[in-house]
Amino acid sequence: MRKLQNNELNRKSINDFKIATKTPLILILDDVRSLNNIGSVFRTADSFLIEKIYLCGITATPPNKEIHKTALGATETVDWEHYEDVLLVIEKLKEENVTVLAIEQVESAVFLNNFEIDSDKKYALIFGNEVFGVAQKAIEKCDGCIEIPQLGTKHSLNIAVSTGIVVWDLFQKSSKKKSL
């Protein structure tokens, strides 16, 4: 077994990424404080050809040295837009027939492992503040909530980790549906 060199990985160029068919998934970061978390989410979005990221509230925007440190150039590939109010983004996406889901621990949330993807739908996922999570006012506007099952003493995950888990899960579920 030999570790592959970067030139063997068939990476897309920025132009190839821009014209590639995207995964029908949108990420919404609301009031995310950590610039490293924002950069990590961009990198995850690039990895899975995510359609777009909405940066809301106090969430910082590129160009930013600290975001770039973890994004490693993904801010140049992934489309993004900033909105002051996450509620406006939710309304806009729902008008476009996008199913908006909060990733949060709420009454009647669907555990991620039980969530079934509808291949005819496009989804937007809201990830909230590192301390307070997704705001209640945003949750009330969502079509539903997904919760990541957690079994230990801590009942929260870093936002970048949560994003990676959920995006991977929905990506692989949608890939399986396409191959059926």
Image (spheres, rainbow, N blue to C red):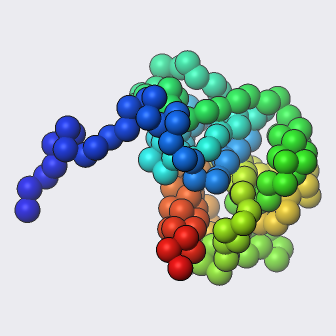
Q: In which quarter of the image is residue 162?
A: bottom right
Is 100 displayed left or right of 150 in the figure?
Answer: right
Question: Residue 84 placed where, x, y %?
Answer: 82, 29
Q: Is residue 121 visible?
A: yes
Q: Residue furthest left?
A: 1
Q: Which residue is drawn at 48% across and 19% down?
A: 65
Of the pair 42 and 23, the residue shown nearer to us: 23
Q: Quadrant of residue 13?
A: top left
Whether 124 is drawn above or below 149: the answer is above
Q: Residue at x 77, y 66 (%)?
A: 145
Q: Is residue 173 visible?
A: no
Q: Which residue is drawn at 55% across and 18% down?
A: 63
Whether 67 is drawn above or below 7: the answer is above
Of the pair 24 and 127, the residue shown nearer to us: 24
Q: Residue at x 74, y 63 (%)?
A: 121
Question: Residue 66 placed where, x, y %?
Answer: 49, 25
What is the total number of numbered labels drawn onto the structure image? 0
Question: Residue 96 placed where, x, y %?
Answer: 85, 48
Question: Residue 22 placed where, x, y %?
Answer: 57, 48
Whether 123 is drawn above or below 9: the answer is below
Q: In which quarter of the image is residue 1?
A: bottom left
Of the pair 66 and 51, the residue shown nearer to us: 51
